[in-house]
Amino acid sequence: MIEVCCALIFHQGRLLAVQRHADTDHPNQWEFPGGKIEVGETAVECIGREIQEELGIVVRPEAFLYPLVHDYGSKQVKLYPFVCQRGMQELCLTEHQRYIWLNASELGQPDWQEADRLLIALTRLEQLHWFGQDDEDGGKKQCPAQD
Ligand SMILES: Nc1nc2c([nH]c(=O)n2[C@@H]2O[C@H](COP(=O)(O)OP(=O)(O)OP(=O)(O)O)[C@@H](O)[C@H]2O)c(=O)[nH]1
């Protein structure tokens, strides 16, 4: 079982999704930023490290959702989803090809990895109260190349 933390990062009431590169497992599919928990690391430490590495930002975990186990056939993944608010730094991708900010009604549109599609459906993600909420930095800081 691969234990993976992922971040549901909200900003101005929208949720961040990132797209995997074409040359990875699950090419071009969408997921939440995150990665595998390393030996000796807590889940909270993992999510902080992964988000710093992948997006170059510091996030503040606010809540966690029930973990979800999914069997891809070739691997079993246990996904630990953390709800986070975005920090103040610019968002710049190091391990994904694109990002998008989704509102609740757009959650079904990306071609998600299977575990993420299940997470969205089973937890009724569109009902999270963070959708539609504003946050403090007014959305001014974004990586220019991604706008
Ligand atoms: N980061 C992330 N990984 C996810 C999500 N959903 C999901 O099934 N996964 C799976 O969890 C694992 C996360 O691994 P990783 O981020 O550390 O590294 P990776 O994609 O290069 O995977 P790999 O080392 O197995 O090739 C992958 O097997 C990926 O397919 C998600 O929302 N975020």
Image (cartoon, rainbow, N blue to C red):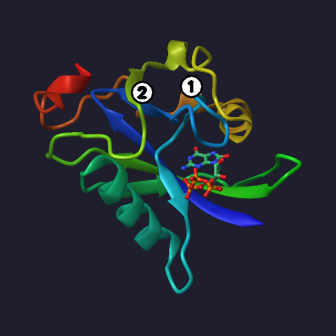
Which residue does the numbered mark 1 point to in the structure image? 126
**In the rendered view, does 98 fall on the left or right side of 141?**
right
Of the 4 image quadrants, the one containing the N terminus is: bottom right
Of the 4 image quadrants, the one containing the C terminus is: top left
Task: Mark 2: give few (<14), some (14-19) or many (20+) Cα within 10 Å.
Answer: some
Q: Earlier in the sequence, mark 2 or mark 1?
A: 1
Above or below, 42 relative to 19: below
**Who's the residue at 71% across and 58% down the image?**
78
Assign a secondary structure to mark 1.
helix
**In the rendered view, does 80 fall on the left or right side of 2?**
left
Circles 2 and 1, Cβ within 8 Å, touching? The answer is yes
Q: Amino acid at mark 1?
A: Glu
The percent coordinates of residue 69 (x first, y second) are 78, 54
Quadrant assignment, res 37: bottom right
**Who's the residue at 34% across and 27% down the image?**
13
Quadrant assignment, res 103: top left
**Who's the residue at 24% across and 51% down the image?**
57
Q: Which mark is residue 32?
A: none
Q: Which mark is residue 131?
A: 2
Q: Nearer the viewer, residue 44 or 143?
A: 143
Task: Mark 1: give few (<14), some (14-19) or many (20+) Cα within 10 Å.
Answer: some
- Label 2, label 1: how many angstroms apart (C-alpha)? 7 Å
The percent coordinates of residue 20 (x first, y second) are 52, 36
Assign a secondary structure to mark 2.
loop
**In the rendered view, does 82 fall on the left or right side of 143?**
right
Q: Nearer the viewer, residue 4 or 25?
A: 25
Q: Nearer the viewer, residue 91 or 108?
A: 91
**Who's the residue at 56% across and 31% down the image?**
22
The percent coordinates of residue 111 (x first, y second) are 63, 22
Above or below, 44 relative to 59: below
The percent coordinates of residue 121 (x first, y second) are 71, 30
